[in-house]
Image (tube, grey):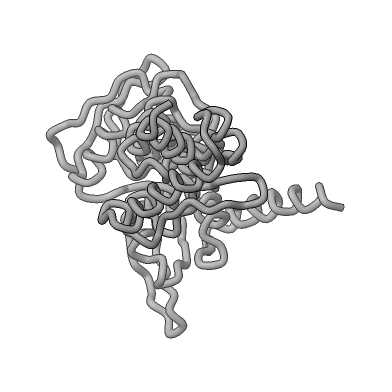
């Protein structure tokens, strides 16, 4: 095997995360171990001199089991992608196959030595292969941002509703809306048809609102996610008390996911039901 082919072989295998022994390389290339050491030095010189590899941040080192590629530098894009996957993993172990493939395409654009870690992280997810309700979610978010009424076909019935919010819970997407002065939450994937109307709605007229106390540090995020009907008070200790249009399921999600920076104040039946649920969970641990 000629020298250039041998060097490229070492380079490629190390980039793919392999640990390679001197003797293995020597036998494969039919050269001495000293020749392999010189090959490795050539690659390390390349790392040092190349602007792409950020010189001193990447090198081949010899450890107990053989040669390994060590990098002390990661691109901001790869770190951001890894952080995003870790955050999603904390919410759900499942990715729809379209989302999975989106991550896969992004990883393919990363530096070669970063791909192994990112692919391993991506493989922690299970793939969901049923139809992804992406188009409906996009229409819902458009209607929410523009305060447009929407026509929705659900359970064979067509109704005009006020879109309020979306959330991801129990491994599925949920849509909260007001219909006939009552707030409901349904799985997005069960909506049979969805169309954004040209008509604008001014306010929510739900017969039963939920009063929530939110820490100021979460306020910007909270008001983007939920339909604020009325701001009641700003306390001296940095709390904001508001009335929102949401279902009991939404209220539980707020109380659980945002605790201790959010809590339900009214209605009392939601609080009692939420405490009962917490007690049920607690009883599982004796």
Q: Residue furthest left?
A: 198
Percent position of residue 218, x then y: 41, 66
Percent position of residue 248, x then y: 52, 46
Residue drawn at point x = 52 percent, y = 50 percent: 253
Q: From what the image shows, is residue 180 above or below residue 98?
A: below
Residue drawn at point x = 43 percent, y = 79 percent: 238
Is residue 270 visible in the rendered image? The answer is: yes
Q: From what the image shows, is residue 224 above or below residue 235?
A: above
Which one is nearer the viewer's eye here, 146 or 55? 55
Q: Residue furthest right?
A: 286
Q: Report the side of 251 relative to 54 (left or right).
A: right
Which one is nearer the viewer's eye here, 244 or 69? 69
Residue drawn at point x = 71 percent, y = 51 percent: 276
Percent position of residue 7, x then y: 40, 37
Is residue 169 visible in the rendered image? The answer is: no
Q: From what the image shows, is residue 189 above or below residue 87?
A: above
Which one is nearer the viewer's eye here, 56 or 209? 56
> Which quadrant of the view contains residue 21?
top right
In which quadrant is the N terminus drawn? Answer: top left
Q: Report the side of 252 relative to 154 (left or right).
A: right
All told, the count of numbered labels is: 0
Residue drawn at point x = 82 percent, y = 51 percent: 285
Q: Residue furthest bottom?
A: 236
Percent position of residue 180, x then y: 35, 36
Q: Report the side of 159 relative to 126 (left or right).
A: left
């Amino acid at each position: 095997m000629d020298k250039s082919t041998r060097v490229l072989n070492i380079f490629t295998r190390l980039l793919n995360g392999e640990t390679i022994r001197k003797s293995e390389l020597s036998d494969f290339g039919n050269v001495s171990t000293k020749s392999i050491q010189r090959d490795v030095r050539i690659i390390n010189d390349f790392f040092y001199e190349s602007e792409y590899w950020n010189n001193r941040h990447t090198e081949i080192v010899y450890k107990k089991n053989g040669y390994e590629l060590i990098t002390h530098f990661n691109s901001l894009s790869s770190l951001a992608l890894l952080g995003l996957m870790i955050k999603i993993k904390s919410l759900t172990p499942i990715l729809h196959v379209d989302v999975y493939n989106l991550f896969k395409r992004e990883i393919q654009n990363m530096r070669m030595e970063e791909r192994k870690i990112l692919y391993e992280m991506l493989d922690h997810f299970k793939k969901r292969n049923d139809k992804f309700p992406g188009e409906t979610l996009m229409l819902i978010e458009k209607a929410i941002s523009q305060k447009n009424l929407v026509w929705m076909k659900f359970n064979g019935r067509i109704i005009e509703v006020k879109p309020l919010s979306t959330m991801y819970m129990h491994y599925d997407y949920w849509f909260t809306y007001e219909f006939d002065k009552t707030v409901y939450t349904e799985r997005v994937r069960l909506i049979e048809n969805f169309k954004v109307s040209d008509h604008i709605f001014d306010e929510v007229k739900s017969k039963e609102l939920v009063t929530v106390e939110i820490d100021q540090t979460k306020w910007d995020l909270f008001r983007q996610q939920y339909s604020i009907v009325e701001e009641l008070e700003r306390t001296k200790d940095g709390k904001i008390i508001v009335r929102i249009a949401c279902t009991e399921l939404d209220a539980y999600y707020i109380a659980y996911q945002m605790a201790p920076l959010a809590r339900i104040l009214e209605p009392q039946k939601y609080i009692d039901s939420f405490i009962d649920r917490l007690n049920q969970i607690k009883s599982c641990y004796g």
